[in-house]
Amino acid sequence: GESVGLHLPTLSVQEGDNSIINCAYSNSASDYFIWYKQESGKGPQFIIDIRSNMDKRQGQRVTVLLNKTVKHLSLQIAATQPGDSAVYFCAENTGGFKTIFGAGTRLFVKA
Amino acid sequence: NAGVTQTPKFQVLKTGQSMTLQCAQDMNHEYMSWYRQDPGMGLRLIHYSVGAGITDQGEVPNGYNVSRSTTEDFPLRLLSAAPSQTSVYFCASSYSEGFYNEQFFGPGTRLTVL
């Protein structure tokens, strides 16, 4: 069945280093992918998205890479800051209005 | 804009009780949805609406009802609460039919069913 998963449940990085959060998806028909950030006690917040006709998209300090060949998605955060500590979800849109979310990766930033 | 608001923030129910979780948005978004979030799992879609008067089921609709009488409001009703419905509930909205557009989430309602 359709699933969106994450390679690592937790990731710990030093402040100032770059972070890479990975995600695998199983539905090759998915054509829209989103990364969300969720801080403790808050709702998910949109970070960046990418359509399947793209391989890479950059935002402010964040880059999303899409490898459709191996059905892999990654989120890169440059110069990670303490405020980046949160749970990060990848999500895929498989058509219509139904978005499937992964379980999440918790990012810890060490000062 | 207040964005997406949800009330209450916390709620404790006894098994069999009913209640309504409120959700409102002031961004004139057509698409609204309800998710539940359980530990170690991603958000799962309960119900969604593409406009006033139109609703449909998501992945886990059993035990929940919704209605959409206005663009702004999308309440979620628990008909007879069960311990399995203990979860954090998020309401979200987006300004189009959901494709290629980000969803804006509310702060969540933490529900415990005893």
Image: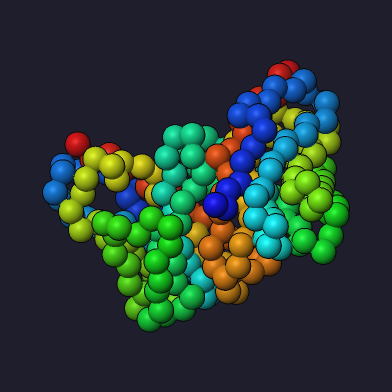
Does the image show residue B95?
Answer: no
Residue A103 vs residue A85, the one in the foreground: A103
Looking at the picture, does residue B42 appear above or below residue B90?
Answer: above
Q: Is residue B96 left or right of residue B82?
A: right
Rendered view: A6 above or below B107: above
Dividing the picture into quarters, in which one does residue A87 lie? top right
* Residue that appears at 58% across and 48% down: A3
Q: Is residue A9 left or right of residue B67?
A: right
Residue A39, visible in the rendered structure: yes
Residue at the image position 69 percent from the left and 43 percent from the top:
A24
**Quadrant where the C terminus of chain B is found in the figure:** top left
A84 left or right, relative to B34? right
| Farthest-out residue, top | A111
Quarter of the view holding residue B58: bottom left
Left or right of A10: which side holds A63? right
Q: Position of residue A16 (x, y in %)?
A: 82, 26
Query: In percent of the image, x 44 and y 44: which residue is there?
Result: B37
Q: Position of residue B113 (x, y in %)?
A: 23, 40
Residue B26 versus residue A25 in the image, above or below = below
Point out residue A89 in the picture as x, y percentages from the top left corner: 62, 43
Quarter of the image with the N terminus of chain B is bottom right
Residue B65 at x, y = what percent?
Answer: 29, 64
